[in-house]
Amino acid sequence: MAPFKPDLSSSQQSRQPLWKVSLSVRGMTCGSCANNITHNLEKNTGWKVNVNLLANEATVVYHGSKEDASRVVDAIEELGYEATLNQVVDADESHKESPDQDRTVQILVDGFRSDTCPARVVQALESCSLGSLEVLHGPSVVKPIVEIKYTPNAPRFTIRQILATIECSDGNFTARIYQPVTREEISRRVDADHQKNLLYRVIITVILTIPTFVIGIIYMTSVPDHDPGKMWLMKPWRVGIGRAQFILLALATPVFFGPANVFHRRAIKEIVAMWKPKSRIPLWQRFYRFGSMDLLVSLGTGVAYLSSCAQVIAAAVDRPSRVDDSNFYFDAVVFLTLFLLVGRLIEAYSKSKAGDAVHSLIKLRPTTAILIETGDDEAQTRDKAVPIDQLEFNDRVRIPHGTSPACDGLIVHGETMFDESSLTGESRLIKKSAGEPVYAGTVNKGAPVVIQITGAAGHSMLDNIVKIVREGQGMRAPVEKIADVLTSYFVPAITLIAIITWIVWLVVGLTGAAPVHFLQGESSGSWVAFSLRFAIAVFVVACPCGLALAAPTAIVVGSGLAAKHGILVKGGGEAFEKASRVDCVVFDKTGTLTMGGEPKVTDSVLALGNDDDEPVLAGQRRMFFFAILRATEESSSHPVAKAIVSFCNSEIESSSLPQQQISISDVEELPGKGLKATVIQDPIQDPGSLPITEIAVGNEVLMGDLNVTISSEVSQTLQTWKTEAKSIALVAIKTHGIDIDGNSSNWKFAAAFSISDPIRPETAGVVRTLREGGIDVWMLSGDNATTARAVATQIGIPDSNVIAGVLPTEKHERIAWLQSTLQVDTKQRQRRRPSPSSSNGSSHPSRLAVLFNPFGQRQKSKSPEQQLEEGSGSGSRHEQGEEKQTGGEKMEEGFDVHVNIDADNNNNNNNATVAMATGQEQEEEEAPKRRRAIIAMVGDGINDAAALNTADVGVAVGSGSDVAIASAGFVLISNNLATMVTLLDLSRAVLRRIKFNFGWALAYNLLAVPIAAGCFYPIVVKGGGGGGAGESQGGDSADLHTHVRLEPEWAGLAMAASSISVVLSSLALRLGWWGIGFRPRKVGGAS
């Protein structure tokens, strides 16, 4: 097939649809296979390829048409692998949420008897008048699957009614929802088939190995020479060859062409695919970048078997009186094949276990649910067990004790306790009552409850977790590029080493340079066989699998551990690698360091009229004002706005006065300041009404923009609230003609509210733990500086590490500023613990050097305060932005200033060394080596999305918005902030294990290949026995020599053990043993 390289420019490609193809790939055995597929497919213009060796899966993203997916299959099969198309989706649309509750399903209809049956099904569906329904693809006799799109409206119009409509159209029809096989199930089937195939081959080989062992090992080495049985076996039968070798030939032949054929067949496919006429691999590349583990094994066993057969043929031609048994490797072929197959079987089983995380999550979901059906009389209900894929949005489902909800929902009746540890890692039971959400995968540990479905099958939190874990496991870490380079050239390099080994030993032997006792006194003609044993060992002992599995297995196991502790790894290996090197963590305040869920109004100040107003009139004005304020704040989703709405509701409901119905229009959201609205009311009002035309709710910046005068008494009250770590919301009103005090119309102060957002109980412990670990902790807030500092003081963040008064649109700019400002002294990477005296955060074990003037300007530079003040009206929604705070000193003209915070300072004052030098006078040899700090941002709201995306590591807390979660590399499902410490610790553990795996796999090959090649063979140990890695040699019976050597059989066993050990090393992360597995730290204050 000709390569698919459309002649399109980048702009033309970008205008074509973007498709994502998922394929199941059979035949991949090592990293060389994955690299081969990736390297060749990426030669196609615009193709982005990701091959997952553990999941036996490949994903290709390309611009073009949907039909081009078949080209992807053809391209993989051309390389000698089997590819099955699993799914083709629009890559652009797959990331978009449906704006409505439309549902697309496939229905399998059994019972078709003629060609008219499909038409009856379509007709029945199109005539359905219960609701909106569209037939996308009709069924056929060959493929009785109909695809429909409809808008459910439970309980009147659901998928259950649609299935009943199909079955009523013909009594022979049975309809059910068709569920395509999941990627995990396909992968498990491929693994199961592979393991079963290997098991059959192992059984056959074991059966043939038993007589081989008896004849080739026991009789030839342990039985006395005068034994009749051994004499009969060793006696030459034909052409000077003993009967034993002919028996071993009969045993080795079925092994070589039977069980070992799994290696030969794949190796031949690779060679044929590479050298066929239409191959897309460049000619010069075929000589230095080819092959896989199967090719090495095939070459090793092939050389052993074919060289032995060649000896038999040569003996038949020359007819010598006797041919020495050491020239034959028939027993080695059998043992080598057995060890290789057993190793491959254990490796396949271990790899399948490494990817069990997703399957374990899927098993949390039940298959059926108890649906509460309503009869003609809505008061009459009955319970019915239905498959979960027949549940719809708004269906009511009963959750008995000890069962799990099939879908996400809200409790509408009952109160109970739920175990959410399977999703969030929280061990304690969570109390749930009416109106609170429950999630699929959790377990009801209390009384039965009734829930109303809010997320049908496929749209629950559990489904999203499975999707994120699945995608994260397939994302590669940058460190894997090292393995890619090594495995790409591994097979050619080993092949060259094996050939050189054979030639060198053959030349050394034939020229007489090697001692005669190397051959145990045999004829010089056996040097060929002697040198071949080294070459065979080299072929077999080399193992690229360990290098290829080092990172993927650790990442898969790490992702599973993360999910177990309530952490979703969206960024895969790259996210783990960056998180392991984090130097600074920046927390958003509201909703991250604080509870954020339900802030409360704790204090209020009202200025609605004269003090001498009648009580009734004052009360009416008060209720009218609260009605206007409530209507205004209901237009906002900000947590502070919700707190004010709740406060207004409580005030209005507690009053005996009639409630006012208010309408507003022209609501204008002012980012970082608040909002304004126009009040609509009848000009003829009762005496208690206020002639308000406009209202503004926001922070002090907004009040300043509107020229609102705030009295000194109120200002003093506001300052008190700020020092108590409370947020401030101010209200100003504008009236008809004259204001409520009889003065000329203008914006006037009307009310002030303090909103308390409790700090999470574990926050202080998390901050302390991070700082003890040498990580700088900063706080980013849109709140006023006084309130932000008050919160920081309570949780142990230094005032110098607080950035306050930040507009929502400026958060990502502050992250970028930190990235260009904070630097790490690479010579002082060792983390140190702070002194006990540094309790207030003024002295901390920072590894950061703060570089102010990150842009390297040689003109008068701006201080951090000036940088933060750029842009008018800094401040957040409902919060004051007049003060912006960061640590640092003002710049002097023409100088670069570095502030190094001394980690060893035990005093409360930072010991900062300020080094100032002009650009021409800097002495680079004396300057410490620095690199940019790695910044992690932790946030939860829509306003944090850009900042999460800008940071090196974005972490979204579980209660965050969908936008924030989409922008993050990690998602903390649990609201417990202590999981942030677990995340960083786990990331370091995963990266350490990857490095250990790489080191072990590389060290194994660097040591094993020279031993197999005979580099240490001249080393002689007197008086030793052979063993697996040694060989008894001697010129006579009195002189016994043991040489350091790795026989081909043991080389195969060592190769299998190397890859198995890498997989087991990654699996060991699951153990809670110190120094071997991963165990999360306990954080003080965390529940």
Image (cartoon, helix red, strand yellow):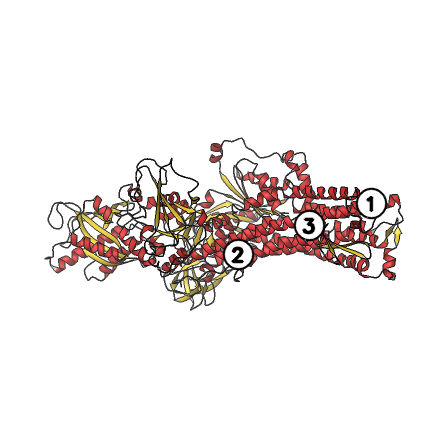
Instruction: Give the spatial CA distance, label 2 vs label 1.
Output: 58 Å
- Where 1005 falls versus 396 (above or below)? above
Which labelled disc corresponds to residue 1011? 3
Work out which quarter of the rendered image holds the N terminus and state it: top right
**Label 1: few (<14), some or many (≥20) within 10 Å?**
few
Q: Is 229 positioned to the left or the right of 858 in the image?
A: right
From the image, tell me which residue sits under label 2. 357
CA–CA distance in space, label 3 to label 1 = 24 Å
The mark closer to the camera, 2 or 1, is: 1
Q: Quadrant of residue 959?
A: bottom left
Q: Residue at x 43, y 44 (%)?
A: 928
Extreme residue toward the bottom, this view: 447
- Amino acid under disc 3: Ile
User: Which residue in the structure is indicated by mark 1?
Assistant: 525
| SS type, badge 3 | helix
Mark 3 vs 1, N-terminal side = 1
Q: Is residue 585 visible?
A: yes
